[in-house]
Amino acid sequence: MAVVLPAVGVLPFVLLGVCVVTARGRARASQVISVAALFNGLFAAWVYWDTPYVHPDPQGGLIFMLMPVLGVLGALALLIDRAVTKPRPS
């Protein structure tokens, strides 16, 4: 269990990294995915900081199980969009 929880916490950022790498060569897709990855990272950092220090309560630990799930859903949406859309002819 000591390896599973950190792996689940890092999984959204790995998927976002895959999105960024697969969007190379497509300027607009790369920009959109990079901005989404930036907002995801900033939001996750804010929530992980806010939960224990600003709003501490016994149920705050649930955020460490909820945030990776939300991050994975967002990254999967970007991956699906990347797979479905076709590049514009140049």
Image (cartoon, rainbow, N blue to C red):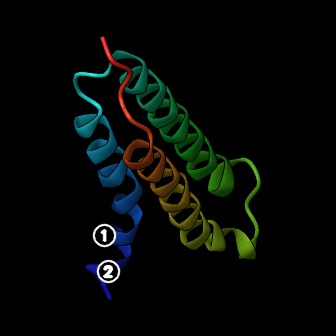
Q: Residue 48 carries which label?
A: none
Local SS, label 1: helix
How many marks can you see?
2
Q: What amino acid does circle 1 point to? A: Ala
Mark 1 = which residue?
Answer: 7
User: 32 above or below 10?
Assistant: above
Q: Where is residue 27 in the image (x, y as percent from the top left)?
A: 34, 16
Q: Is residue 66 shown left or right of residue 1?
A: right
Classed neighbour count for the residue bearing mark 2: other residues with Cα under 10 Å, few (<14), some (14–19), many (≥20): few
Mark 2 = which residue?
Answer: 4
Q: Quadrant of residue 62?
A: bottom right
Circles 1 and 2: CB atoms closer than 8 Å = yes
Residue at left offset 55%, top offset 33%: 39
Q: Is residue 79 shown left or right of residue 67?
A: left
In depth, the one of 84 and 36 nearer the eye is 84
Q: Position of residue 56 (x, y in %)?
A: 73, 60
User: 16 above or below 62?
Assistant: above
Q: Position of residue 43 (x, y in %)?
A: 59, 40
Residue at left offset 38%, top offset 70%: 8
Residue at left offset 42%, top offset 18%: 28
Q: In which quarter of the image is residue 31?
A: top left
Inter-mark Cα distance, 1 to 2 = 5 Å
In depth, the one of 24 and 73 nearer the eye is 24
Q: Position of residue 73 (x, y in %)?
A: 54, 60
Q: Is residue 52 shown left or right of residue 13?
A: right
Q: Quadrant of the N terminus?
A: bottom left
Q: Is residue 20 shown left or right of residue 76?
A: left
Q: In which quarter of the image is the C terminus?
A: top left
Local SS, label 2: helix
Q: What amino acid does circle 2 point to? A: Val
